[in-house]
Image (cartoon, coloured by chain):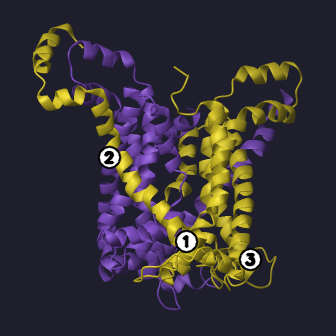
Amino acid sequence: MAWDSRARRVMMIYLPLSCFVLILLFPFYWMAITSFKPNAELLNYKEHNPFWITSPTIAHIKHLLFNTAYPTWLKTTMFVAVGSTTLSLFASTLAAYAIERLRFRGSPYVGLGIYLAYLVPPSILFIPLATVIVQFGLFDSPMALILVYPTFLVPFCTWLLIGYFKSIPYELEECALVDGATRLQILRRITLPLAVPGLISAGIFSFTLSWNEFIYALAFIQSGANKTVPVAILTELVTGDVYQWGALMAGSLLGSLPVALFYSLFVDYYVSSLTGAVKE
Amino acid sequence: MSVTTLPAHRVALRQPGWIARLFDYKPFLIVMCLAPAIGLLAVFLTYPLGLGVWLAFTDTTIGKRGIFVGLENFQYLWTDPLWWGAVFYSVFYTAVATFGKFALGFWLALLLNNHFPLKSLLRAIVLLPWIVPTVLSALAFWWIYDPQFSIISYLLVDVLHIRSTNIDFLGTPWPARFSLIAANIWRGIPFVAISLLAGLQTISPSLYEAAMLDGASAWQRFRYITFPMMMPILAIVMTFSIIFTFTDFQLVYAITRGGPVNSTHLLATLAFQRGIAGGELGEGAAIAVSMIPFLVFATLFSYFGLARRKWQQGEAND
């Protein structure tokens, strides 16, 4: 067919696609290249081509790791992300199991209610939540974040896991029930092992979302050591009139790496569950 | 399950303790399974939501319990040019960014739906802007928009010679507004593209074959097959996108903090500035609550979009 000729394909598909990739990836390239540029090159575009580094340095990263509390921030963020992911997976697996497998009157409405909770954005909750956190004596504690993050993680994971449980044949559970297994045994030995791929994708989503969370961490955490990476970089590293762009970009790069690595390990799960969730 | 292991299992499963028997009582099990999720959501979502609405009608400040003041906060906001500015920019930001995200994201989805080598790798790469913490990529944009060392200015001035002076991206209202929108679109494209790609893959190729036989042009195939078939998914993804763009916080907070001269305040950043940084919890809550009418509208839109596909409800589709 004439219209599907090679030249047309290049113009209609490869050219726009390369533009998209170039633009979508450029900020990361710029982040990376800034992290390794010595200050002399960083602020001198006349003598140095800004798109390349002539004498790469790890001074910015060294500064970040040894002269700032960056390692502590990383640890706190990891702690918060792992904690809230565990809690959310626990809560949402049980909820999804009850809604999809135990089937009771009104279970669709409970499912819908939990789903609607996802549509309540953190920006309208953070002010009252701050007072709740203070009442519970959790202000300035990473525990506050671990308890609060499930408000957006549970709806998401439950929704994802309902879809997953749906794909597991009901007959397997019935057989076990006939064999005299208790409901808890069925859940632990049959349903959960079969739902592992779903649990993994829910876990990845939760981990990424809690690593990225910003507004609660900004509003509830005051002391430097308890801050998460996104908040700490913005509030502790951005100082003075002359920004330390090298260190800032190195911090952004390092803070993005755990999520990017974690995600790249499970990218197939990630894309398929995202597309799966949308497909039904 | 092999036959030989079954009897052994049966013995092991025979004697359930009283706890296990209690869990076999279905209503109890249902309550126990739902308790953690519902409990967390009730304490940290439903209760604060109600509290937030209450706070909006009080004059609470940090450290002082407020008293009920009726609509005073809202009356004040009504006369506050900064609130009106934030309403204007929130709507403008949402409208332009959503349009940009969907136009470009749909285009990218159509591109990714073609067959070419390294397809799955490309899909993975394309998702990166969405994966990386928003604040961290926002910092990269802040650096890209630097008044002196912006790489965009460098390209326009020193490489392409289109302009003679650097662009002051974040120093003047309109350029700052559009700079933030550009960063938001950049971040939103991957999600839109991947979600719509999933939708595109559910469209049966036989529809296109039939249309081709009938002599439909590429545009007609898009207009009369792709677009209508994508409507349900477009409606859902767009609702999500509108809600999260309208209530966005971190991108603006990271790059401009509402400046210059408060021209880029979204309702969320204004609520933070008044409520947390300024200590006026009641007023901040009122600003946050003023987002609710918009969100209810978007959610109803979503609900009907969902109902049309019996989305994830487990109702009448098994």
Sequence-earlier tag: 1 or 3: 1
Name the subunit of mark 3: B
Please give the name of the residue rendered at 31% of the width and 19% of the height, measured from the top-left corner: A173
Please give the name of the residue rendered at 36% of the width and 63% of the height, measured from the top-left corner: A145
Supply the letter of whichever chain is purple: A
For disc 1, the marked residue is B56
Residue A44 sits above or below residue A231 on the image = below
Residue B195 sits above or below residue A226 on the image = above
Q: Secondary structure at mark 3?
A: helix
Residue B1 location (% of width, % of height): 24, 14
| Amino acid type, label 2 | Pro
Horizontal relation, residue B7 to residue B315: left or right: left
Q: Are marks 2 and 1 on the same chain?
A: yes
Residue A276 sits above or below residue B123 on the image = above
For disc 2, the marked residue is B36
Furthest residue in direction bottom, as rendered: A241
Residue A12 location (% of width, % of height): 78, 43
Residue A29 location (% of width, % of height): 55, 64
Supply the letter of whichever chain is yellow: B
